[in-house]
Image: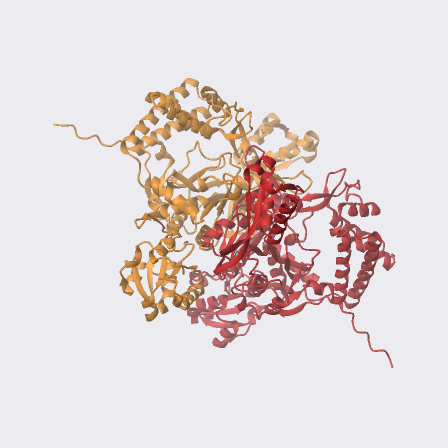
Chain colours: A orange, B red
Amino acid sequence: MTNPPAAPVDLDALRASVTRQGALVRGLKQNGGAAEDIKAAVDELKKLKVQLDAEIAKQGPETDTLSKADKKAMDDLLIRKMFVVPSFEIYGGIGGFYDFGPPACALKANLLRAWRRHFVFEDKLLEVECTNLMPEVVLKTSGHVDRFTDLMVKCTKSGECYRADKLLEDHVENFLDKNPNLSAEEVEKHRLHATMAESYSPEEIHNVFQEYGIKAPGTGADLSFPIPFNLMFQCQIGPEGNLIGYLRPETAQGIFLNFRRLLEYNAGKLPFGCAQIGNAFRNEISPRNGLLRVREFQQAEIEYFANPKDMRHPKFNLVAALELSLLTKTNQLTDGKTVKMTCADAVAKGIISNESLAYYLARTYLFCEKIGVDLKRLRFRQHLDTEKSHYATDCWDLEIKLTSGWVECAGHADRSAYDLTVHSKKSKVEMVGTHKFDKPEKRKIVEIKPNKGKMGRSFKADLAIINELLEVLKEDTEKALAFEAELETKGEAVIGPNCDGKQFTLTREMLSIQVVEKMVSEEKYIPSVIEPSFGIGRILTAIFEHNFSTREGDDKRGVMSFAPVIAPIKVSVLPLSSNAAFDPFVGELEKIFDEDDLECKVDTSSVAIGRKYARADELGIPFNVTIDFETVETRTVTLRERDSCAQVRIPISDIGAAVRNLVKGAQTWQDVVARYPTVAAAAEE
Amino acid sequence: MTNPPAAPVDLDALRASVTRQGALVRGLKQNGGAAEDIKAAVDELKKLKVQLDAEIAKQGPETDTLSKADKKAMDDLLIRKMFVVPSFEIYGGIGGFYDFGPPACALKANLLRAWRRHFVFEDKLLEVECTNLMPEVVLKTSGHVDRFTDLMVKCTKSGECYRADKLLEDHVENFLDKNPNLSAEEVEKHRLHATMAESYSPEEIHNVFQEYGIKAPGTGADLSFPIPFNLMFQCQIGPEGNLIGYLRPETAQGIFLNFRRLLEYNAGKLPFGCAQIGNAFRNEISPRNGLLRVREFQQAEIEYFANPKDMRHPKFNLVAALELSLLTKTNQLTDGKTVKMTCADAVAKGIISNESLAYYLARTYLFCEKIGVDLKRLRFRQHLDTEKSHYATDCWDLEIKLTSGWVECAGHADRSAYDLTVHSKKSKVEMVGTHKFDKPEKRKIVEIKPNKGKMGRSFKADLAIINELLEVLKEDTEKALAFEAELETKGEAVIGPNCDGKQFTLTREMLSIQVVEKMVSEEKYIPSVIEPSFGIGRILTAIFEHNFSTREGDDKRGVMSFAPVIAPIKVSVLPLSSNAAFDPFVGELEKIFDEDDLECKVDTSSVAIGRKYARADELGIPFNVTIDFETVETRTVTLRERDSCAQVRIPISDIGAAVRNLVKGAQTWQDVVARYPTVAAAAEE
């Protein structure tokens, strides 16, 4: 009797172990854990990584993304057909800048129209367009001036700069290539540095650079100590040179700045959402991966403002039963499984923190469906607690599987009241919503009666800080009562410290505090914000990869199977030859499609019809209308569907409506096939 | 017998005299005319200006723009309804930056869609989207780094900067206000400085500043000598700090850089046009006049590439008979009259330099008609020869009459081959079109046979320059033959100088030249460029001013009569009261309009219907659908047209199609009135 074959090790579970152990290491470091604990945790992490890599090698590569050959064919097509080309190409180009040529420009315009239709129009959101240039005060207040950085090292000879983590990753890869005979354990020790590169502190990564003796590429000279490099482009506004401006690193801030006017425009009613589509700029140290990491890109963002005490969404019932693929923070730290769950369940179980956040995950899912992202290669991954921005209370990334792995293409953050709070504080402009009760409610109100003269004489310039601290005290009935009791018994009490660590001793004569019950009819609050944020270039990359395939012909032909609603060109008109006899018929067809606003491309060149189809397929034209001598005679056309290559014969009087309804989704290709006689696809090759 | 009343002096003619005299003064200055000639010309200019001002005062103000009261009401509406608001308002704002709120954001999106439909879609142009940030080499080559400047003076105490010409204008105005008893001649002397401010050289304007003793506003301190200030925003690309970038001051350059790929995309065929819609940035020293002079704005530009030897346009026949209002350069210098002339005539008479340029003037006119610019307040003004950019061979501005005068809202320049030539030279990338002859033609070809060894030894590094000079020689058969003759007779000849003033003596042994006749089948050329260029913010300003009016009601109510095609909201649904009984009916109507992609706004508030109409009118909603208890019962609605306030009763089953066809322009309001019973407008106030 032989042993049964071993069940394949569960890769998800193994990945989760690595994630969990990584989180543990980060946690220990953040909380200043003992050196030996950290070392032990790191050793364990190493072991797990070795195991995972070995398993991946054994089970073979995953096959749900483009093959290397197809990826190459696609990249070639994208540049050859002028979808996306390097900017300033005739001057040698600059990393991280791309231009959109005619087909991608139209594709993007259609994608943005679909986005606007789906998110803005259907939900009656507001929309604004704010400036790309912003003064320093805005981005200082938002935290970008201080925190929007990557670690950078500089060649002491040439002055060239490198992103420290990427340089380390590349170095480790090269090192392992050049040393093929290392033991598995040694390999793992090196690989760990690459894995950890992004989360090292300046000191840590500097030590690793020393350990390896990493020098500047090219020159071989020493590298500087790593320093944080701010990713915002800075310039001067106005001629004086004393007003610093930045190109916005995200579109969100403009919406926050306009909150008060937007609320007024919305007749004072909350919740409401406001969208903005526009450019954002990040001075990446090492741009790479085509449109995935660029220096200038387009965002489409929504800020949905709501009462933090009531995060229900009025249209949640429409998506409650929708199933989403969720990779929760818990699962990332346990079995690593992505689970399918309805929005209603996820909210009920507290996995997604509230209805409004869940509503937007669902809407994003439905949007992906409309624009032709493969729903099997899509998941929502929750941020780990150790990974979240300081202001976010919950955050879910839309991740799409591409050849470069799972890529974040949209974020959905519950930013709480962070943004409005900081801008309101800095600008001294109140940014609040008002919740009107159905009927007046009884509330305990803290009333503070200060002796202004005494306070003023004692504290002078500090009075403003004390007043702020008293405002905070007002919000907590218990604390206020305790403070009053202390004043009463000890004659004095300490208030503070505030965020700058300042505290003050107040005396009995300076103030008295009481708590009274009052009937109130409304309550003010700083709204919480749910922020769905889309990187348009990344979504486009997903659309390219998920819709590209090759078809065997005389040579391998690329096909872009864009969803008709976003296809840059909806229909092509292809006379069988360049014979002038076809011209009037071509003109007639063009007019028909123009009247329906259907972008149409005519190919009257003399190449064979198969070649014309191939050209149309490369541009992703979903419907092709062919005319030959027979169809001219019978006033019909041959209509070919791009993906199936199936063909039907249709009277010219019907062709406008047929294509219009196919593009709108008002009828399917099957409907058309059922209605009109099919034609053998003889001309295909 | 009394004298007949004097005929009013012709203001146009008087204005033309001023223009003509101004051009003469500029011409004299540019060509270094004698001081006494310039003085005489300037004195004459002064006299004419006095005369013109007196005439304008006598004949009264022109009345075809908004009254001061209406302009104020409009500006108030624009900000109150969040069309256009100052950016960073909560932090005090910064001159020259504006945000577009929900109604203007939608209006602009619709305007751009109409632009794209009209210019790109109907003429099958290409479209690209290039980056906002560009490296220095691009803008150095285009001439912007050296020449895109305004004169600036700086306060020596505070460092604050002022645009010199504007400061002078303001100073003169104040000076005249404070000195009301000056003689007419003295007044005119001062006013002339204001008129000439923009065209003074740094030295000239400095002298005028000295004459007046102009000091810095506020501080009263001395001002610096005027220096040219470059209007481009500069920043660093990448972390090294050695790659200077600029925010583009116009969208045009990105198209030129992509010319070669665009030509390839267009299967090598010329002529073709390429459009780009996007932001441009200018660091104005003194931004003013709302959206008319801002630091960040949107452009929509077309570069139409054609063979300079054949500037016919394939669709010219469609516009040949269209009459345009032209203010030619000749008329500006003679009688000052704007003339009406067909495009065909204007081209035939050589007034507009070619068909392609005239075609675009006509297309711009038709676009203005579509979007609701008042065609009576629109003209095309040709640039004077003294005013044109160095590269332009002909240029016509679309000027629109606004409260601030005639404002340039679009330009139409024949830029000749300037842009492609400079970028091609700098980048060493060939940018040419190919004209294939119908049959081969006989051509004289200059052939140069160099002795490369001899040349190389004699000139070494200068050989490249000599080769360039020889390439130029090749293009002129006569000169080439003369050169060869000189070599033959004298044994040597001088070639050059080139643009740097270098010249070289070549000898008989170094080369021989002959001219041969050859049959050639094609000819290469650097395409000429026609550039229609729209300032979207200025067009929007024109739309606001030309569509705003006030209507008497309980109080004066503003109405925005936007053309339905660009109106931000197409239809409002207005139940007579906030009674919940209307809710299902409102929902039904919303669904009907949503399905037709008609932006719809519901007002269920409890205010009177007259107030709801007023709100809708302020947002420029062209159609209002009212429901009351009677209409609910009969399943009808009342449809009100914004501009006439007329109302009809329509069955709910017809309302979707009725509004859709009104918005598309497929039917007029008269058609609707003819078909359905009218309703008295009792509810209007």
The answer to whether any part of residue A474 appears in the image is no
Residue with the most extreme left position: A1
Residue with the most extreme top position: A36
Please give left or right for residue B63 compared with residue B605 in the image. Answer: right
- The image shows residue B209 at horizontal and vertical percentages of 80, 46
In which image quadrant can residue B136 be found? top right
Please give left or right for residue B505 compared with residue A53 in the image. Answer: right
**How many marks do you count on the picture?**
0
Q: Residue at x 62, y 34 (%)?
A: A512
Question: Against B669, is A554 above or below?
Answer: above
Relative depth, front residue between B454 and A477: B454
Question: Against B173, is A52 above or below?
Answer: above
Please give left or right for residue A43 compared with residue B520 in the image. Answer: left
Relative depth, front residue between B479 and A313: B479
Relative depth, front residue between B401 and B613: B401
- The image shows residue A636 at horizontal and vertical percentages of 33, 68
Is the N terminus of chain B in the top left, top right, bottom left or bottom right quadrant? bottom right
- The image shows residue A214 at horizontal and vertical percentages of 47, 23
Relative depth, front residue between B3 and B157: B3
Is the C terminus of chain B in the top left, top right, bottom left or bottom right quadrant? bottom right
Q: Residue at x 76, y 52 (%)?
A: B31
Q: Residue at x 88, y 58 (%)?
A: B183
- The image shows residue A177 at horizontal and vertical percentages of 37, 26
The answer to whether any part of residue B586 appears in the image is yes
